[in-house]
Amino acid sequence: MNSPNQHIPVSNIDPGKNVGDGEGSVQVHLEDDLMQTTAKVFAVYGKGGIGKSTTSSNLSVAFSKLGKRVIQIGCDPKHDSTFTLTKALMPTVIDVLESVEFHAEELRPEDYVHEGYNGVMCVEAGGPPAGTGCGGYVVGQTVKLLKQHHLLDDSDVVIFDVLGDVVCGGFASPLQHAERALVVTANDFDSIFAMNRIAAAIKAKSKNYAVRLGGVIANRSADTDEIDRFNEAVGLKRLAHFPDLDVIRRSRLKKSTLFELDEAPGLSEVCDEYLQLAEQLWAGTDPLPCEPMKDRDLFDFLGFD
């Protein structure tokens, strides 16, 4: 019998049968050695538009400022996760695979890995055309290429920046690779509602994979009272708080990370918060025994000032 954190080899799965990967899931498990690495691996989730790419890119730079070798993997077909690091929209893994008719052995690392600010290595997984395939396949192929070219072995930190809410197995696939999942949220009903569903997905994945909830990052919020109240109720923890500052909005327009900008109100404090978050994550966070609420219970819990 498989232990809760043991990966089940694909060769042992009958594709015609449902397999245990959390309640009701029919996903295919990864090969045993696909993501074996000494790097610390984080998957960043949150409601669509909440600022995951901004958070991921600045966190990547913060890790690099600590002297760590970092790879950031964008998991959105829009391939806009890393442009503040590279100053351009980079070709995606699916683009370069298509250019060689999906003969992956013909690719070199420089075909799909691009160096960004302060040495952060940037990869955009991309995705299939809308309505034609599963994003989980693309994430799997990206990890496979990184492993084949020994790039994971040469990294200290890997950050997956994941598309929107968890709505299908495809975009939950980074959870099969990560050690810790981080949830970005604002101090509002919709963001916390999405966070609760993400926490449920992570809990389901943790039955068969090593991923555990690492904590919550409050973003675009003057206050954190509703986030903190929810966290206390379900067993989560806030790791950092980034207020809704104009300099953060402008950093995206300038195609720059916060660490590259000239002094502005609140900028140094935000950069210090990112550095403290990176130090905290590098030191290691305890897995959080979160118990997500049922949707209707959360509906009743939230929104009463």
Image (cartoon, grey):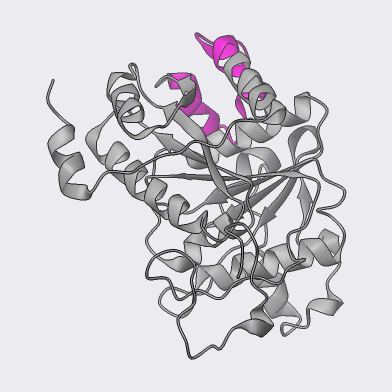
Tell me the quarter of the picture where residue 260 sits.
Answer: top right
| Nearest the eye: 255 or 280 | 280
Residue 238: image x %, image y %?
A: 45, 25
Residue at 70%, 72% in the rendered image: 31
Residue at 45% across / 51% down in the picture? Answer: 203
| Of 14 and 105, the residue lying toward us | 14
What percent of the width, then of the height, locates residue 201? 42, 54
8 up-or-down from 204: above or below? below
Q: Residue furthest front?
A: 1
**Residue at image location 54% in from the left, 68% down from the top:** 136
Q: Nearer the viewer, residue 72 or 37?
A: 37
Measuring from the top left, give residue 289's x and y in whole percent. 46, 38
Q: Quadrant of the N terminus?
A: bottom right
Up/down of 254 relative to 152, above or below: above
Q: Nearer the viewer, residue 190 or 37?
A: 37
Residue at the far bottom: name it.
16
**Please, what is the dominant secondary structure of the magenta stretch?**
helix
Decide whether residue 96 is among the magenta residues. Answer: no
Drawn side of residue 264 relative to residue 114, left or right = left
**Point 81% across, 47% down: residue:** 38
Please give left or right for residue 244 compared with residue 113 in the image. Answer: left
The residue range painted magenta reads: 246-271
Please determine whether, in this image, residue 102 is positioned above or below residue 270: below
Is residue 172 rendered to the left or right of residue 188?
right
Q: Is residue 265 magenta?
A: yes
From the top left corner, tell me how far across and down residue 285 is, in percent: 61, 30
